[in-house]
Amino acid sequence: MQNLSGIIGNFKITGTLAETMPLGAGLINDTYKVKTKEENAPDYVLQRINHNIFRDVEGLQNNINAVTRHIRLKLEESGEKDIDRKVLHFIPAMDGKTYYFDGENYWRMMVFIPNAKTYETVNPEYSYFAGKAFGDFQAKLADIPEKLEETIPDFHNMEFRLKQLRDAIAENKANRLDEVKYYIDEIEKRADEMCKAERLYRDGKLPKRICHCDTKVNNMMFDENGEVLCVIDLDTVMPSFIFSDFGDFLRTGANTGDEDDKDLERVNFNMDIFRAFTKGYLEGAGPFLTPVETENLPYAAALFPYMQCVRFLTDYINGDIYYKIKYPDHNLVRTKAQFKLLQSAEENQADMKSFIDSCVKG
């Protein structure tokens, strides 16, 4: 491992380095807590940016810098207290950039938020908090003046994901088409409907917003009283449809089973989680949403199981070259579980619409 003290020395921190230790269990970036000796100096978080996934580090950091600066401004304008715990604060490198390149790896440093914690629990209470936090996050960024980059191009573009599937079918690298014909047919039956976001955007009826694009319960920090402090893990913040933040949370949070559950009887769409998350989300984001965005939230709840089903099936047909697998048909098992979740979400569309209507009408 690199000499972390040498890396840290390239950032404009306050205080003297005492020790570093691994922090969290992130799958993308390597993260360390940096403790300082002085009582009046903050501690810090050091991260190695995974530039194999985020290839435009300059664009990534510009996005994060613009977002955190704008949120800080909004908090100041509203007279918010304890601002330093309610928005991430990045430390510049000695050359003034918000990252440091050591010749092999890219690094960034931010102030450690004291007396804060994350939760892994997905229940109605925390789902409501998540909806409110991510809705408020979008609302604060609705008028951001900067043009942000797509840190992962076409990340939630359904037309692009279907093209990848169709290319995989045409090549049939692993000779697996016969066993997945049912799922291919079911996906194609829904393809036109599931691509309507892209069509609405081209027709000028659906805007792109600044979205988090990785809406999980553990991407929020809570204070010692259980109140949400801020949204974290901003690498995927980029222009997208609001469906990204809404649908992606529900794909995992409202699944009563596992993402790769072999027992499909366990996989269903949990409407209690949907109602809690949706209530919070509309409280946070409702004031700026257009009618087209609001009325298509049930579509978003079905879109993301569909999209993930397409992605798992694509990888299975390609011979398992993208997702890590634990056994030979792991991606097929994932495909079947996501399709079952999609079917359950489809069965609940009318109830979703009724609940959203009741929230909007107050």
Image (cartoon, rainbow, N blue to C red):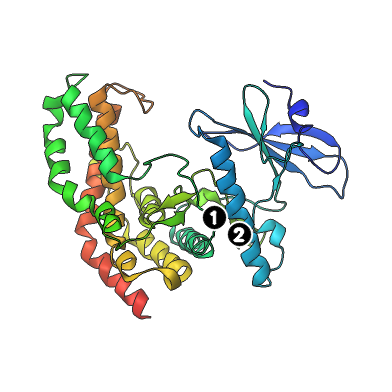
User: Real-space Cα distance between discs 2 and 1?
Assistant: 9 Å
Q: Residue at x 76, y 32 (%)?
A: 10
Quarter of the image for the N terminus: give it.
Answer: top right
Q: Residue at x 46, y 54 (%)?
A: 211
Q: Mark 2 near mark 1, Cβ–Cβ under 8 Å?
A: yes
Q: Write down the quadrant of residue 109 in the picture.
A: top right
Question: What is the number of the mark on residue 337?
Answer: none
Query: What residue sits right under mark 1 in the picture?
Result: 146
x%, y% of residue 119? 55, 50
Quarter of the image for the C terminus: give it.
Answer: bottom left
On the question of residue 86 being in view, the answer is yes
Instruction: Report the front residue among 150 and 255.
Output: 150
Query: What residue sits right under mark 2 in the picture?
Result: 70
x%, y% of residue 335? 25, 36
Please, what is the three-letter code of the amino acid marked with disc 2?
A: His
Please, what is the three-letter code of the amino acid marked with disc 1?
A: Glu
Tally of numbered tags: 2
